[in-house]
Image (spheres, rainbow, N blue to C red):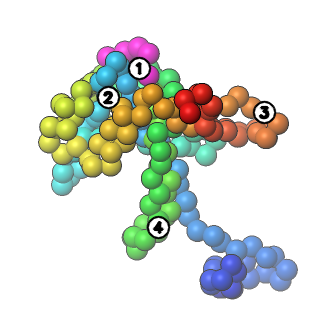
Amino acid sequence: MVRADGGRPRPACPAEGCGFHHYGDFSIGVGAVVLRERQVLLIERRTPTRTFWQTPGGYVEVDEAIHEAVEREVLEETGVTARVIDVVGFRHAAGMQAERPVSNIYVVFRLEAVAGEPRPDGIETFDAGFYSLDEAERLQGLSAESLWFVRTALQASERPGFTYEAPVDLAQRPGRSLFGLRDTGAL
């Protein structure tokens, strides 16, 4: 059954008095600009039709804090232990592909490498390493989106992005993570 809600037709529960409307399918991904000095961690991925380079990342599990998800993804894909510094930015992709109509938010974090040397996992990643910006820009097949986030993270290193706040009155419900801008006194 379809009913109008919010100015558009939506799939709805047909039961009398139910009131449920389906607002769509959504996913959250995380990306990592992992820094070791002035170098960034990049990975090589492969599909049946192409090979490309990008920053590590993946999906946030439904029961996982977003900042823990990005640290997990980096470790799984590269063997490098990294800790979140702040949020560089995000990308939104509207669910406009007929074969996969899912709206996706991809939050990109800046992290510092804590331990480990890059090694691909052989499943999702086939090469991994730390690269200077000049080296990264010369990598064949580096995704434009990853390069944008790398440049942004490196150029904005003196200006922190959104940082994690330990739970405060606003975030007392289990599973909430709050990120915001900090006053650095730079103005």
Name the residue furthest front: 187
Judge left or right: residue 137 versus residue 10.
left
What residue lies at 63% left-to-right and 80% top-to-bottom? 10
Residue bearing mark 2? 41
Query: Would you say the residues marked 1 and 2 are in contact, meaning their CB atoms lie under 8 Å apart?
Result: yes
| Residue 34 at least partly seen | yes
Q: Residues within 10 Å of mark 1 (few under 14, many from 20)?
A: many
For the N terminus, the quadrant is: bottom right
Q: Closest to the observer: 28 or 46?
A: 28
Question: Which kind of residue does numbered mark 3 sit on?
Answer: Val
Q: Which mark is residue 168?
A: 3
Per the image, label 3 sits on a secondary structure element best described as loop
Q: Which mark is residue 187?
A: none
Q: Which mark is residue 95?
A: 4
Question: Which kind of residue does numbered mark 1 sit on?
Answer: Ala
| Front label number (4 vs 1) | 1
What residue lies at 53% left-to-right and 43% top-to-bottom? 60
Q: Tell me how far mark 2 sits from mark 3, CA to CA.
A: 33 Å
Residue bearing mark 1? 113
Figure label count: 4
Per the image, label 1 sits on a secondary structure element best described as strand
Judge left or right: residue 64 versus residue 98.
right
> Looking at the image, is mark 1 or mark 2 earlier in the sequence?
2
Q: Tell me how far mark 4 sits from mark 1, CA to CA.
A: 33 Å
Tell me residue 45's x, y (percent): 26, 41
Above or below 98: residue 29? above
